[in-house]
Image (cartoon, helix red, strand yellow):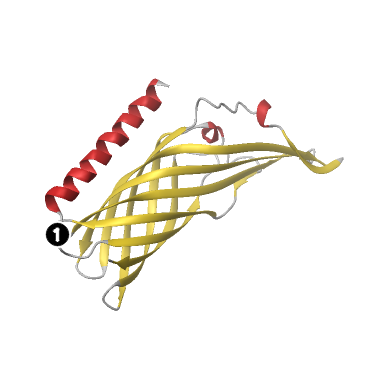
Amino acid sequence: MKSARHWIHLTGILFLAFLSCSNSFGQESNHAFGFNLQLAHYISNDREHDEHFMPINPGFELLYKHPLKNELSLISGVNYSYSRWKKTFATATYFRRSAHELAIPLLIEKSIGQRFFLMFGTYCGWLISGKAESQNKNNPNWIDVTKYSNYSESSRFMADLCLSAGARQQIGSAHSVSIAPFIRYKLKDHWMKEVRTNTYVGVSIYYFIGL
């Protein structure tokens, strides 16, 4: 709980810094709202056995971009992500876990010319729901075994560092689309840390419309 409070305080400080920078450096250049389709690939902790995540774990973001000076922008909003892990034993017994997570991204974007950009920041949030299930050859139905899987209502906090680089295509004067591969590292994880590594990769597809 102390660790969770630490990250909550850090998120609050970063958010206040976001507001302060917005007031101090804001220009008359276009602010923008955006949508991001996120496709993530998690890596299982135990790759020697038959366990894995879905190849693509989906998510999406609703974002607000505030331009600063020197080709910098501050970006924040809300992020939702879904992931599912599965393990198979030789006895034809199957286990799987699924997680729904909600996070607040706080990102700095650095434009490189008109077409390219770098992005760095944090994602702090919570596991909003998780489920563990089992199945065997004698019973094709999935059985809820969450309460036997070390699931904790009091340990849901997560925090990631994110680094991405992408390319942008302007569409008219107000619209843009971009694609950005990313790598993220989990500073703090919850129940899913038992089955996934701290590092994962993916790609984000952004659409922004200027105000």
Tell me where residue 114 sits by quadrant.
bottom left
Indicate whether 154 appears above or below 136: above
Question: In which quadrant will I find the C terminus?
Answer: bottom left
- Picture coordinates of residue 165, whole percent (x, y): 31, 58
Which residue is most to the right? 138
Query: How many other residues sit within 10 Å of disc 1, few (<14), some (14-19) or many (≥20)?
Result: few
The amino acid pointed to by label 1 is Gln
Q: Is residue 93 visible?
A: no
The residue drawn where x is 29% and y is 79% is 172
Q: Is residue 170 left or right of residue 45?
A: left
The residue drawn where x is 50% and y is 51% is 41
Tell me where residue 13 sits by quadrant.
top left
Q: Which residue is mark 1?
A: 27
> Looking at this view, is 72 or 64 the one in front?
64
> Looking at this view, is 15 or 101 the one in front?
15
Q: Is residue 168 visible?
A: yes
Q: Is residue 118 left or right of residue 129?
A: left
- Picture coordinates of residue 81, whole percent (x, y): 50, 48
Question: In which quadrant will I find the N terminus?
Answer: top left
The residue drawn where x is 13% and y is 58% is 70
- Picture coordinates of residue 73, whole percent (x, y): 22, 56
Tell me where residue 9 sits by quadrant.
top left
Indicate whether 132 appears above or below 121: above
The residue drawn where x is 18% and y is 43% is 20
Kind of element beneath mark 1: loop
Indicate whether 104 appears above or below 60: above
Q: Is residue 167 left or right of residue 113?
A: right
- Picture coordinates of residue 15, whole percent (x, y): 27, 40
